[in-house]
Image (spheres, grey):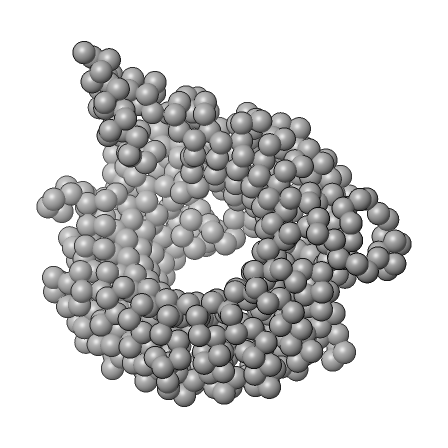
């Protein structure tokens, strides 16, 4: 009878839980632990450990009973090469190794020799080896994984050598359908396209110019590249070699202004029409601290694009300062099935582009308008008529005010709202607080006119947001103090991620309130997973007692940079992370979870 009960428990209840809940259940009793270890873990085929960064011991403990895995995702921020090699094997079909800050490219050879049956591989690595060593290890890996269908290689660092993928074109398997490489030189990308254009046999670089006929061997459908330059030559090479592309994502980061005859022009945009199956297009020029953009593209170029690619469902454009309302509106009107529309740094984009948005793009689900200074509340009111909208990102659109928030409150499917830098006030928060909008992610970062009172309006009016809000960003808001944090701890039962970086009036009282949140809230609350108090200068070392165990039992990531804790790293690490090997402390100013910036620092190890 006990065996039957254990079997029913495993099949009907435990297998429906995620890993964290399984671990919690296993701690309750010997019977439940046995049911988890013997009845659930061996039957798992997929495991995602990306939400926290385990150390070597924790990883070995978790994976010990998972003998049937075919898909594995790891956050490798604190893992060494030996631990990663220990989880590899021919049973894996899908492998994602993220934030590999401590791993050299020798892990590539391990993957090639131990995982011959891989179909999907994602690697995020820091730049730790010379290009020659990396290329050699990469070639060995690709030769050992002949069945790859999806390959994503992201090499990041301060001085990344863009020649790292110089030889990748010779070893790519013909089974490949999805490819992402970062970084890559434009010239190497063109040679890579020629590789797709020729037969699958190995050929020297000198042979490429003589081969013109396309081969059916490669069926690549998705291509994503981060380059030094996006040019007409590159676009023409891509569309000529891969006319079957469904998704194209290109980003460049030129160090200097491109010469006129080597930049992107109308010719390149028009050539995209050769990819008649294209449904997703992203063209972004990112130049930090440099005013470099696609200066040869104006409205006419976007007119040609919108006519050539009417089947687009997702459009993402960044670095087109000469394109105005007419150009962007042509995309909204021509692409009748458009679901995602993202524009960055469009200084001529105004409300007029969205004048008739409901008559042209009723299917819009995501709209992101980042750093578009002419966008005002009038555009948001128009977008408020798009009933299917789920994501609305208005980050750094500083002319957004309270007058549009009633329209936002009418979006019954909206789950993500970014008002960072907007001119909204406490009064505007009242509209959101009373609405039935199921917002799970909200950013009010830099909203200087929203204070503690506004947070009270947002969360004390029995709106849906108190039940659904899981991620909240209140960074760089001078009007936020302990009072707002106390309101959050009392009202937000689903909150798992909170950023209050550079909130100068937040004191130890806020940390105490967050630490005791589970006991204060009636009906129980989800545990906080990520907390960022970077540059909260009013915090004292006295808050250390509230950051230590047993408080914050579920915390995975904690940002403490530029606080009084930063000067006592060793003591703080030992105190906070004792008996919590899964907790990552960041003293380097990263955003939540070190999603960007992990390659620039070594995390605290304990």
Residue 275 can be seen, yes or no: yes
Taking 9 as reference, is 522 above or below it?
below
Residue 266 in the image: x percent, y percent?
66, 80
Taking 246 as reference, is 516 above or below it?
above
Residue 466 in the image: x percent, y percent?
18, 57
Q: Nearer the viewer, residue 253 or 96?
A: 96
Residue 379 in the image: x percent, y percent?
35, 82
Residue 69 in the image: x percent, y percent?
46, 29
Taking 444 as reference, is 47 above or below it?
above
Does residue 288 appear to the left or right of 187 in the view shown? left
Q: Which residue does the image show at 52% across and 65% down from the upper left?
A: 279
Residue 574 can be seen, yes or no: no
Locate residue 421: give its quadrant: bottom left
Assign the N terminus to one quadrant of the image. Answer: top left
Q: Nearer the viewer, residue 232 or 63?
A: 232
Q: Which residue does the image show at 28% across and 45% down from the upper left?
A: 528
Q: How many marks?
A: 0
Taking 580 as reference, is 556 above or below it?
below
Locate residue 111: give its quadrant: top right
Assign the C terminus to one quadrant of the image. Answer: top left
Q: Which residue does the image show at 30% across and 61% down from the upper left?
A: 415
Q: Nearer the viewer, residue 600 or 563?
A: 600
Q: Which residue does the image show at 24% across and 77% down from the upper left?
A: 407
Does residue 165 appear to the left or right of 209 in the view shown? left
Does residue 93 appear to the left or right of 107 in the view shown? left
């Amino acid at each position: 009878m006990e065996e039957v009960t254990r079997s029913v428990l495993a099949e009907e209840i435990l297998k429906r839980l995620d890993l964290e809940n399984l671990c919690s259940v296993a701690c309750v009793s010997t019977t439940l632990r046995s049911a988890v270890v013997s009845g659930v873990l061996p039957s798992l085929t997929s495991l995602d450990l990306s939400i926290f960064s385990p150390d070597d011991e924790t990883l070995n403990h978790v994976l010990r009973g998972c003998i049937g895995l075919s898909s594995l995702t790891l956050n490798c921020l604190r893992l060494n090469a030996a631990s990663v090699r220990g989880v590899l094997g021919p049973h894996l079909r899908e492998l994602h190794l993220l934030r590999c800050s401590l791993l050299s490219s020798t892990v590539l050879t391990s993957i090639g020799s131990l995982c011959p049956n891989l179909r999907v591989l994602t690697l995020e690595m820091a730049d730790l080896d010379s290009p020659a060593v990396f290329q050699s290890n990469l070639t060995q890996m690709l030769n050992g994984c002949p069945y790859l269908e999806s390959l994503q290689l992201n090499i990041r660092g301060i001085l990344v050598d863009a020649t790292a993928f110089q030889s990748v074109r010779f070893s790519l398997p013909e089974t490949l359908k999805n490819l992402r490489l970062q970084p890559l030189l434009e010239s190497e990308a063109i040679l890579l396209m020629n590789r797709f254009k020729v037969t699958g046999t190995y050929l020297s670089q000198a042979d490429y110019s003589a081969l013109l006929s396309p081969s059916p061997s490669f069926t690549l459908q998705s291509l994503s590249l981060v380059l030094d330059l996006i040019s007409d030559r590159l676009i023409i090479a891509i569309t000529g070699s891969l006319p079957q592309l469904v998704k194209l994502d290109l980003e460049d980061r030129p160090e200097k202004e491109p010469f006129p005859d080597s930049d992107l022009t109308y010719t390149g945009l028009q050539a995209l029409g050769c990819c008649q199956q294209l449904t997703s297009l992203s063209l972004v020029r990112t130049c930090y601290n440099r005013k470099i953009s696609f200066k040869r593209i104006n409205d006419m170029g976007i007119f040609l694009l919108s006519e050539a690619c009417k089947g687009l469902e997702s459009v993402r454009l960044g670095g087109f300062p000469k394109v105005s309302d007419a150009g962007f509106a042509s995309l909204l009107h021509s692409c009748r099935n458009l679901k995602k529309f993202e524009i960055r740094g469009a200084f001529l984009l105004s409300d007029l582009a969205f004048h008739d948005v409901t008559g042209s793009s009723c299917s819009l689900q995501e709209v992101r308008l980042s750093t578009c200074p002419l966008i005002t509340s009038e555009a948001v009111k128009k977008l408020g008529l798009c009933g299917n909208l789920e994501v609305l990102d208005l980050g750094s659109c500083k002319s957004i005010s309270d007058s549009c928030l009633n329209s936002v409150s009418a979006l019954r499917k909206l789950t993500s709202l970014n008002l960072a830098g907007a001119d909204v006030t406490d009064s505007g928060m009242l509209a959101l607080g009373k609405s039935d909008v199921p917002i799970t992610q909200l950013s009010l970062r830099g909203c200087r006119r929203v204070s503690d009172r506004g947070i009270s309006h947002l969360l004390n009016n029995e709106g849906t947001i108190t039940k659904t809000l899981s991620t909240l960003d209140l960074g760089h808001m001078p009007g936020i103090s302990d009072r707002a944090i106390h309101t959050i701890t009392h009202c937000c039962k689903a909150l798992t991620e909170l950023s209050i970086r550079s909130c100068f009036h937040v004191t130890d009282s806020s940390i105490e309130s967050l630490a005791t949140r589970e006991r204060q809230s009636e009906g129980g609350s989800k545990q906080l997973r990520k907390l960022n108090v970077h540059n909260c200068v009013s915090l004292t070392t006295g808050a250390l007692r509230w950051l230590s165990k047993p408080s914050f039992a579920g915390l995975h990531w904690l940002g403490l940079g530029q606080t009084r804790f930063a000067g006592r790293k060793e003591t703080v690490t030992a105190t906070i992370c004792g008996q919590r090997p899964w907790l990552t402390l960041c003293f380097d100013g990263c955003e939540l979870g070190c999603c960007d910036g992990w390659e620039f620092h070594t995390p605290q190890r304990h």
